[in-house]
């Protein structure tokens, strides 16, 4: 009699093991697909909220969802009126409209992700149709659902700077030459947003100007530029008197070592650009100064603003490694180190190799413990400086005030060539450095900061 042979225990275990391996291999991709589907669903929900919000404005007879004031109206339902959506259990939102019906700020969250979009230019609404999954953030801020009027768009320091000046396009500026009366002096804006920060137009001061002074924390500062989130970046100028008052402490090395890929980092790990980070010598000094002089002003400073330490892509020339800021700004040498025939600075900062230094990990690497760092070589170039090899040094820039005629220059945050970091040389030109230079900290104000007065002059600062 023929007996059908069954599976042995070993065969069954082998089949189970194979199935388990297949599941383990497939599971990450399945989870990624599931996560992507959830994100896509939330973006769709976020866009659909606009119409529901407009209905709330007209149909909510109790007006518990609406806050009025000045020339703004906010659609902001209380927790008991959170919207139930198809893809999420509940969605909370705040939408601020100006008098013309433009959306000036849009916040929405499903409890796990959130989206925040802000219009930093009055009269120009948020483009909700352009929201994508790339806009999704986590770690929802504590004050995310504070239902208040968003008046900072109309009255912010950002807007005050624009209103007090006559901004000009930088399309005619030749960045291979220093600032001058014929090559940029005053408040300018990026004519091509491909060079702006995160695709946004940036306003910046260039050349010898005397209307960008700020008084904060008992010290004088100079306005460098606006930020993509509607804030304002400042550089330290001390008490504003003398050629060295713009420095904190004495001269210092950038790091304890050099001639290494990782020695150009504002923080570093000597095995990679990621992982557990060690502070550079400069960062320790800047952080300690912040703790002793600015810590009580912490609420004024942005934790999402980016300070760029552009290590994104280093290229090899056959005898040296070159970092991106060098290729953008050192344009005149004949040794094939640099690509371009003219300088072209940028406010773009890739996060490749953890180049975007931030306090919050939502917009960068999260490696900063305090909202303070250094200026970049690109920012110094926009302010009017060029590489000292390419042209004679020029002092036609506010950025050299209170920071010149010393034995050494001062550190910037941008890597130069292998082991070197950019600096502002004595006399006002850009250059690379390995050894001891002075330090000038930089801070970035929040978009909601307003000025209590002043005209921006040294005698009457903002």
Image: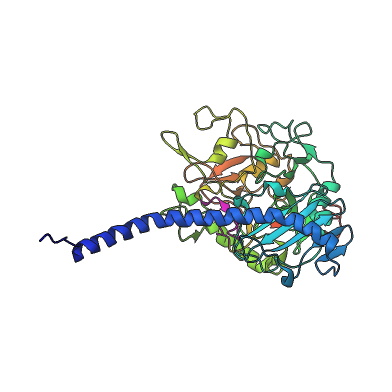
- Residue displayed at 69% across by 57% down: 116
Locate residue 339, reporting x and y percent.
54, 30
| Quarter of the figure with the N terminus | bottom left
Q: Is residue 55 above or below residue 259?
A: below
Locate residue 446, reporting x and y percent.
72, 58
Specify whether residue 122 is painted magenta.
Answer: no
Residue nearest the observer in this picture, 253 or 323: 323
Specify whether residue 366 is painted magenta.
Answer: yes
- Residue displayed at 59% across by 53% down: 40
Q: Main secondary structure of the magenta part?
A: loop
Locate residue 193, reporting x and y percent.
69, 39
Residue nearest the observer in this picture, 441 or 274: 274
The residue at the far bottom in this view is 80
The residue at the far left in this view is 1
Residue nearest the observer in this picture, 307 or 433: 307
Q: Is residue 351 left or right of residue 95?
A: left
Q: Quadrant of residue 136?
A: bottom right
Q: Quadrant of residue 341?
A: top right
Locate residue 213, reporting x and y percent.
79, 52
- Residue displayed at 49% across by 53% down: 33
Viewer can see residue 378: yes
Viewer can see residue 443: no
Which residues lie in the magenta part? 354-368
The residue at the far right in this view is 70
| Quarter of the figure with the C terminus | bottom right
- Residue displayed at 79% across by 65% down: 148
């Amino acid at each position: 009699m023929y007996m059908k042979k069954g599976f042995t225990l070993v065969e069954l275990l082998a089949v189970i093991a194979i199935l388990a391996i297949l599941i383990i291999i497939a599971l990450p991709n399945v989870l990624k697909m599931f996560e992507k589907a959830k994100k896509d669903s939330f973006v769709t929900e976020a866009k659909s909220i606009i119409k529901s919000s407009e209905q709330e404005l007209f149909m909510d007879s109790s007006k518990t969802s609406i806050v009025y004031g000045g020339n703004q109206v906010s659609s902001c339902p209380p927790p008991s009126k959170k919207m139930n959506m198809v893809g999420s259990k509940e969605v909370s939102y705040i939408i601020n409209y100006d008098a013309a019906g433009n959306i000036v700020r849009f916040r929405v969250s499903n409890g796990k992700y959130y989206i925040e979009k802000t219009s930093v230019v009055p009269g120009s609404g948020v483009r909700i149709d352009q929201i994508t999954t790339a806009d999704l953030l986590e770690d929802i801020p504590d004050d995310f659902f504070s239902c208040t009027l968003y008046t900072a768009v109309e009255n912010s320091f950002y807007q005050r700077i624009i209103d007090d000046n006559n901004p000009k396009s930088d399309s005619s500026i030749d960045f291979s030459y220093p600032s001058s009366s014929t090559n940029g002096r005053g408040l300018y804006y990026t004519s091509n947003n491909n060079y702006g920060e995160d695709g946004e137009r940036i306003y910046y001061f260039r050349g010898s100007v005397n209307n960008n002074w700020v008084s904060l924390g008992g010290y004088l500062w100079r306005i460098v530029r606006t930020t993509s989130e509607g804030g304002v970046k400042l550089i330290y100028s001390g008490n504003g008197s003398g050629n060295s008052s713009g420095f904190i402490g004495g001269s210092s090395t950038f790091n304890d070592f050099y001639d290494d890929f990782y020695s150009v980092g504002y923080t570093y790990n000597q095995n990679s650009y990621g992982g557990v980070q060690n502070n550079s010598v400069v960062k320790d000094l800047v952080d300690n100064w912040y703790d002793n002089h600015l810590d009580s002003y912490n609420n004024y400073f942005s934790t999402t603003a980016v300070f760029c330490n552009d290590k994104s892509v280093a290229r090899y020339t056959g005898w040296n490694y070159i970092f991106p800021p060098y290729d953008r700004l050192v344009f005149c040498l004949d040794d094939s180190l640099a690509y371009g025939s003219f300088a072209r600075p940028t406010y773009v900062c890739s996060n490749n190799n953890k180049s975007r230094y931030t306090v919050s990990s939502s917009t960068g690497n999260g490696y900063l413990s305090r909202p303070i760092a250094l200026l970049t070589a690109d920012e110094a170039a926009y302010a009017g400086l060029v590489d000292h090899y390419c042209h004679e040094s020029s002092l036609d820039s506010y950025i050299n005030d209170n920071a010149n005629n010393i034995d050494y220059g001062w550190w910037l945050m941008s890597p130069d060539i292998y082991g070197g970091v950019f600096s502002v040389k004595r006399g006002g030109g850009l250059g690379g450095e390995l050894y001891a230079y002075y330090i000038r900290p930089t801070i970035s104000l929040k978009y909601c900061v307003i000025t209590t007065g002043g005209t921006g002059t040294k005698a009457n600062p903002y």
